[in-house]
Amino acid sequence: MIPSRLGSQGARVRERLRDERNDRRSLTRSRTNTRQQLGEESSQAQSTNLPHEQGKQGGQPLQVDEEVNYPCLNHEGCQCDRQARRTEDVEKLINDRLRNFKIGGNFEDALRKEVDQANSTPFTAEIEQAAPPKRFSTPSFTHFKGDPESHLKHFKSVMMLYKANDALMCKVFAMTLLGAAQDWFHTLPSESISNFKELAYVFTKEYTSYRTIKKNPDHLFNLQKKYDKSLRDYIKRFKAERANIIGCDDRIASSAFKRGLPIECELYRELTISPCQTLVEVFATAERYAL
């Protein structure tokens, strides 16, 4: 069985070598034909561009003193050209391998750096090692959406019972950050945060430009009901804008709401004839007309 198996393997090897030899011969023959064709085209192009002038007698062209150099098509020239081309191919392959190696190395270094950064923490060892209180369960939070002041107020109100526990406040606050805010958190220097006050300060400092700008009550008089929009849309926009105004008087808000309505609107006529006492009554009347 063993000699028979070796004999079959030897036959397959000989057949593979014969196929490779035939492929090399075909490739060499094709390259030779291509070079000969290119040489003939080059010769024809140069002969066409030579300055021929017809003589006055016999119609023979005048002699040209310039020597025309035709491409070398002998066997030795082909061998040299083939060898030079192989050398260029090898050099190109080596350069490509080196380039891929460098790119791969840079990618791996960047990946390791990103993983290390994701595992890093700005908290001190005291905060990291502090255990949460017994029976503590993480409450539901609204994740940070851009306004640091509003987010801190929301967080402190939810964590009111644990505000004296700095370690817990710091760890839970980090859970309320997502996306770019979470990436920013992991870029803080290691062991740079030792209490919640420091964390709240750097957080507010980083995102203070995203804070919602509070508007003046007079801003409400710029709001108007659009003709192509419903009354409910106007009520919704007005309530949203008023929420950004601190200490807005109900009488000013009621007057601004009525002024934003078209004169021909039935709600405008009712608010003019029977003025409401509070802004809540104004919104209740408006909701009745919006049905």
Image (cartoon, grey):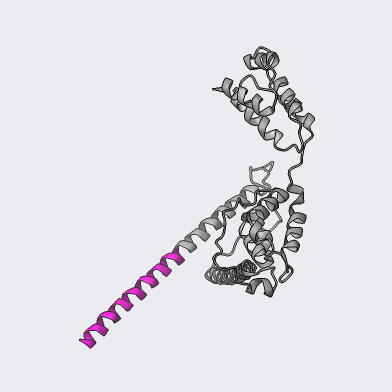
Residue 194, image x, y percentages:
73, 69
Residue that sits furthest to the front in the current view: 277
Check if residue 197 falls in the magenta segment: no
Residue that sits furthest to the left in the current view: 1
**Camera-side residue: 141 or 77?**
141
Q: Residue at x 61, y 52 (%)?
A: 143
Check if residue 18 falls in the magenta segment: yes
Q: Residue at x 70, y 51 (%)?
A: 153
Residue 26, image x, y percentages:
41, 65
The answer to whether any part of residue 172 appears in the image is: yes
- On screen, 96 above or below 272? below
Residue 71, image x, y percentages:
60, 61
Query: Relative to 177, is 16 on the left or the right?
Result: left
Quadrant housing residue 239: top right
**Camera-side residue: 79 or 180?**
180
Q: Residue at x 62, y 56 (%)?
A: 176
- On screen, 124 above or below 257? below
Quadrant housing residue 159: bottom right
The answer to whether any part of residue 229 appears in the image is: no
What secondary structure is the magenta-colored segment mainly? helix
Q: Residue at x 74, y 52 (%)?
A: 207
**Camera-side residue: 133 or 28?**
133
- Start-end of magenta stretch: 1-29
Residue 197, image x, y percentages:
75, 62
